[in-house]
Each structure stands twice: as structure tokens, then as C-alpha cells.
Image (cartoon, helix red, strand yellow):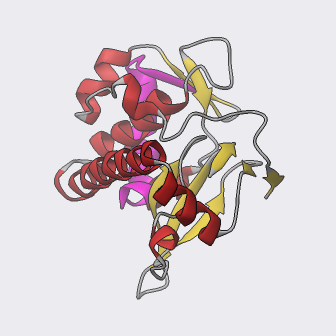
């Protein structure tokens, strides 16, 4: 489980291109498939300095059998992630590049604001144009234009990998994004006393 930093799930396409399939924030499980002894179809890349809490898969599986609440929380987390994946599929296939970029910015901001900075209107944005292009299935040139338009319209500001959202309702409208309920923001509450390691 990711306890600090930002990471991404990625896959390599047949043409060798890298595709970001999910952005991981603190509280997210890096790979649900291993909990059920299934082969992983993706890899996890750190976008910033990260910390993770880990344990043997067998130990986690045993705890899930003994603790119904842990099992319920895991299932709820998996269901919330499935919803985000469906939104990403829709985002990549049926929206313009500007709407795609706005949607991804909305998700990152919605799930991470307030965790790094005291200002609730800013969050870390460690993704470059190539990462945003990979996450939105867009050309880098289209992403650059989209970011420029969002800045020109006064919706966002980006400086030194810091995203400041100046018009949250407008960004949601452009990205066709539905703000998350509090229960969806974080898969598991992060306990700062959890055993962690740098990756």
C-alpha cells in the first residue's frame, strides 16, 4: 500500500509505448491482483519519492479471513478503483484532449489536495507533458495546447510541479468530472506509524 508520494500503474503497448492506466495516491493498494494470487498485468512506477507499507501476501490473506471489516474495506476499495478505471476508459475514448487533461487534473487534485500543502487549492503535480499524454492517450502537442488553454482561461496555474486550481467548478465542467465523496478519496486511511520503506 502506498503511504506517501504519488505513483502510477503503467503498461507497455504492443508498439512499445508506455501507457499510464492509473494514478496512485497515499492509501491506494498498488496491486490488487496479488491479493488473489493472480499474475500482475502492469508495473508500478514512482512519480515522486514514495513510501509503501508491505507484508507477505499470505499474512494479508489470512487477516482478510479473520477480519471481515478488512475484507469489506478491501472490496470497497477495489470497487472504487473499478469506477475510476471505467472513467479513465471513457475519458480516453470519448473526449477531446482538453477534456481528457482536465479530467486527469481533477482526479489528482481531488484525491490529493490538503495532503501535502496547507492551501486546499493546490496540490503536487509531478507529471510532465509526456506523462499526461500517456495518461490521457493524447499527443504531447495536444496536451501542451490543453494546458495552455486552461491557464489562459484562468482555470489553473502550474509552477514548479505545483498545480493551483483557481476555478474548481469550471475545471470539473471541462473535464466532465464528478467530485469524489469523502469515502472515495482514499482507499485505506494512512497510519503514519505503519511500517514503510522508501522506493
Image location (x, y in percent) of residue 123: 59, 27
Res 18 seen here? no
Q: Is residue 36 above or below residue 169?
A: below
Nearest the viewer among 193 and 86 is 193
Camera-side residue: 69 or 4? 69
Quarter of the figure that contains the C terminus: bottom right
In the rendered image, residue 16 lying in the magenta stretch gets the answer no
- Locate residue 171, reporting x and y percent: 34, 25
> Residue visible at 56% across and 13% down?
120
Image coordinates of residue 156 in percent, x first then y, are: 47, 23
Q: Give the extent of the magenta segment.
A: 135-158
Figure check: 36 above or below 109: below
Q: Quadrant of residue 25?
A: top right
The residue sitting at the right extreme is: 198
Q: Quadrant of residue 55?
A: bottom right
Q: Residue at x 35, y 45 (%)?
A: 76
The residue that appears at 64% across and 65% down in the rendered structure is: 59
Question: Residue 49 placed where, x, y %?
Answer: 77, 48
Residue 93: quarter of image: bottom left
Identify the main secondary structure in magenta. helix
Amino acid at each position: 500500500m502506498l503511504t506517501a508520494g504519488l505513483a502510477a500503474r503503467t503498461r507497455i503497448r504492443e508498439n512499445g509505448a508506455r501507457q499510464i492506466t492509473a494514478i496512485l495516491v497515499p492509501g491506494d493498494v498498488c496491486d490488487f491482483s496479488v491479493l488473489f494470487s493472480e499474475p500482475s498485468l502492469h508495473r508500478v512506477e514512482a512519480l515522486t519519492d514514495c513510501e509503501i507499507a508491505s507484508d507477505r501476501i499470505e499474512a494479508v490473506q489470512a487477516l482478510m479471513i479473520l477480519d471481515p471489516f478488512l475484507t469489506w474495506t478491501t472490496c470497497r476499495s477495489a470497487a472504487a478503483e473499478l469506477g475510476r478505471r471505467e472513467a479513465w476508459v471513457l475519458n480516453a475514448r470519448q473526449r477531446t484532449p482538453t477534456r481528457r487533461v482536465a479530467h486527469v487534473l481533477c482526479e489528482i487534485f481531488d484525491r490529493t489536495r490538503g495532503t501535502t500543502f496547507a492551501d486546499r487549492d493546490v496540490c503536487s503535480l509531478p507529471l510532465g507533458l509526456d506523462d499526461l499524454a500517456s495518461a490521457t492517450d493524447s499527443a504531447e502537442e495536444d496536451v501542451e495546447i490543453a494546458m495552455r488553454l486552461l491557464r489562459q482561461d484562468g482555470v489553473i496555474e502550474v509552477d514548479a510541479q505545483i498545480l493551483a486550481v483557481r476555478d474548481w467548478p469550471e475545471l470539473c465542467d471541462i473535464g466532465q468530472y464528478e467530485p469524489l465523496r469523502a469515502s472515495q478519496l482514499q482507499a485505506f486511511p494512512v497510519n503514519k506509524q505503519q511500517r514503510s520503506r522508501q522506493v
